[in-house]
Amino acid sequence: MKTIMKIDFDKNKDGLVPAIIQDVNTKNVLMLGYMNEEAYNKTMETKTVTFFSRTKNRLWTKGEESGNFLKLTNIQLDCDQDTLLVSVDPIGPTCHKGTDTCWGDKNVQAFGFLSGLEEIIQNRKDQAEGKAPIDADGKPSYVSSLFQKGLNKVAQKVGEEAVEVVIEAKDNNDGLFLDESADLLFHYLILLQAKGFKLNDIVEVLKVRHNKS
């Protein structure tokens, strides 16, 4: 198979272009490698990521020894035509040191602000269980107090907020609808942790359903 994209392999004297490897699902960057035209063509043909190894001075299919392959899902070319963004479905850890990424991070789904909010809720739960110190004023936070009241109270709050969302959905006040929606989501995140789960657990369920449809 010949190169389809107009990749500028001649921009550098060695004929190599950087290939940024990104998990297609989590969007986390896993590693950085280099491809020449032959490595690119082999990647496209086999649908398994192949690099040109500068240390081995040959083509190198990631996982050829470890079995931790990078299954290709898509390749994008940047505006200067000299850098590739390679979306993959990783089989096992990516780094040769056994970590998920070459930066030592875990390759888990992140949800930006919501992930940070989950961490705060986890801290409040730890405070309620005596596993973390409470705030400087010595008073338990609203979330900590809610955890202390037990699962039934948390579930009740989710139910109350859900009713409020339905009521506001039938009205024309978008501000109130969004406020109540935020309250519902916030309390649902608390309920998830009260049950020992996180957003990632819900995402995995949705993925399974999607794959079956």
Image (cartoon, rainbow, N blue to C red):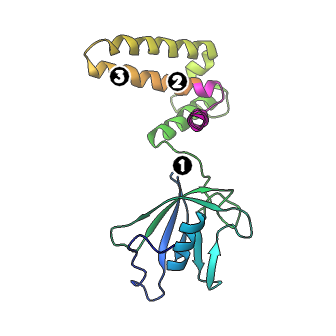
**Image-based side of 155 in relation to 3, left or right:** right
Task: Kindly identify the amino acid type of the residue bearing the numbered disc 1.
Answer: Thr
Q: Where is residue 46 in the image (x, y as percent from the top left)?
A: 60, 66
Packing grade of label 1 (10 A; few <14, some 14-19, many >=20) is: few
> In the visual, does 201 lie left or right of 181?
right
Mark-to-mark CA distance, 2 and 1: 22 Å
Disc 3 residue type (three-letter) = Asp
Q: Where is residue 151 in the image (x, y as percent from the top left)?
A: 63, 17
Residue at figure coordinates x 45%, y 68% from the top left? 84
Q: Is residue 50 rendered to the left or right of residue 117?
A: right
Q: Are marks 2 and 1 in contact (CB under 8 Å)?
A: no
**Amino acid at the residue labelled 2:** Tyr
Answer with mark 3 or mark 2, whichever residue precedes in sequence: 3
**How many C-alpha atoms fall within 10 Å of the one at disc 3: few (<14), some, or many (≥20)?**
few
Dots 3, 2 in contact, CB < 8 A: no
Q: Name the residue under label 3.
A: 179
Q: Position of residue 204 (x, y in %)?
A: 60, 37
Q: What element carries label 3?
A: helix
Question: Which stretch did the figure color magenta?
Answer: 192-213
Q: Identify the residue position indicated by label 1 in the image.
A: 26
Residue 148 occupies quadrant: top right
Secondary structure mostly seen in the magenta stretch: helix
How far separated are the C-alphas under marks 3 and 1?
Answer: 29 Å
Determine which residue is flagged by label 2: 188
**In the image, is 79 to the left or to the right of 20?**
left
Distance CA(mark 3)–CA(mark 2): 14 Å
Q: Determine if the magenta segment contains residue 200.
A: yes
